[in-house]
């Protein structure tokens, strides 16, 4: 069974631009969560989607948004990029129950110049 | 405030010895706890989990202990191997659909 895949793996943008990251969950998984990982703040929850509905959202500004498609694939978008948005963006998939194991992808490394 | 934290940011252990990684949490409503391992350049990898109705759970070479009285959990790794070198995170879940992660402990295995 294929794991969680994320594209692209690396991305370089400049301040003010926007970016879209993609996540394909494990086959059969209906929940996708997104996390931001930085050396200073660690792993922080962005949002979680299940069956195309956002069930929870973290404490990030409105520049961060996401969506999920009917095939459970998910995208997250960051608009008006800031230097502080440089991070590893991780997505995780699970079956959708709160205590189901979340399996992480390799992440997308975003660098904002 | 609410937080999940680890006691030590780094741990150096001799190959073959047992490792103990600690984590403290502050929210008594947390009822599900997970340990993840993250190697350089990779996403976090699930190791083991435990629910709040349990005190101990064992896996292959790993044991997680949960002490709800003092809001503490630990991960024990038996016979630590070089491949165990990584950053270890504890995470907790409350009555929502997110995981809150601790800061991580970097484990280095000495040959």
Image (tube, coloured by chain):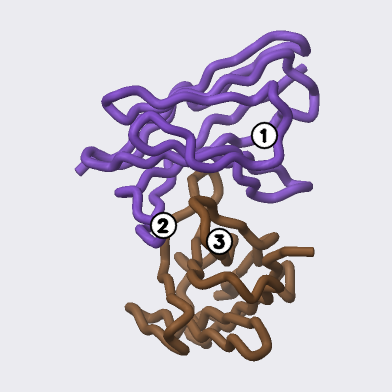
Chain colours: A purple, B brown
Q: Which residue is mark 3?
A: B86
Task: Classify residue A32 by image quadrant.
Answer: top left
B81 and B65: which is toward the camera: B65
- The chain that hosts pointer 2 is A
The residue lying furthest to the top in this view is A17
Task: Classify residue A37 by image quadrant.
Answer: top right
Between the residue at mark 1 and the residue at mark 3, the CA separation in whole angstroms equals: 19 Å
Q: Residue at x 57, y 66 (%)?
A: B90
Q: Which residue is mark 1?
A: A87
Q: Are marks 2 and 1 in contact (CB under 8 Å)?
A: no
Residue B24: image tag: none
Residue A36 left/right relative to A53: right
Asked whether residue B54 is in view, the answer is: yes
Q: Which residue is mark 2?
A: A98
Q: Residue at x 35, y 23 (%)?
A: A69
Q: Are marks 1 and 3 in contact (CB under 8 Å)?
A: no
Residue B110 vertical placement versus A44 (above, below): below
Between the residue at mark 2 and the residue at mark 3, the CA separation in whole angstroms equals: 26 Å
Mark 2 vs 1, N-terminal side: 1
Q: Residue at x 70, y 68 (%)?
A: B5
Residue B17, image x, y percentages: 52, 87
- The chain that hosts pointer 3 is B
The secondary structure type at the circle numbered 2 is loop
Residue B24, image x, y percentages: 68, 76
């Amino acid at each position: 069974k294929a794991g969680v895949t994320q594209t692209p793996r690396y991305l370089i943008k400049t301040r003010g631009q926007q970016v879209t990251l993609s996540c394909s969950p494990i086959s059969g998984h209906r929940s996708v969560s997104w996390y931001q990982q930085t050396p200073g703040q660690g792993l922080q929850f962005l949002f979680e989607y299940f069956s195309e509905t956002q069930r929870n959202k973290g404490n990030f500004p409105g520049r961060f948004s996401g969506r999920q498609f009917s095939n459970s694939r998910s995208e997250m978008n960051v608009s008006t990029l800031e230097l502080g948005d440089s991070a590893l963006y991780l997505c995780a998939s699970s079956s959708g129950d709160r205590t189901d194991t979340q399996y992480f992808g390799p992440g997308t490394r975003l660098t904002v110049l | 405030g609410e937080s999940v934290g680890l006691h030590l940011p780094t741990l150096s252990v001799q190959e073959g010895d047992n490792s103990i990684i600690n984590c403290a949490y502050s929210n008594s409503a947390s009822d599900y706890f997970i340990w993840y391992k993250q190697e350089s350049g990779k996403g976090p990898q699930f190791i083991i989990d435990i629910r709040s109705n349990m005190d101990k759970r064992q896996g292959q070479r790993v044991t997680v202990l949960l002490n709800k009285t003092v809001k503490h959990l630990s991960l024990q790794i038996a016979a630590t191997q070089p491949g165990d070198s990584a950053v270890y995170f504890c995470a907790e879940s409350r009555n929502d659909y997110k995981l809150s992660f601790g800061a991580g402990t970097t484990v280095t295995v000495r040959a």
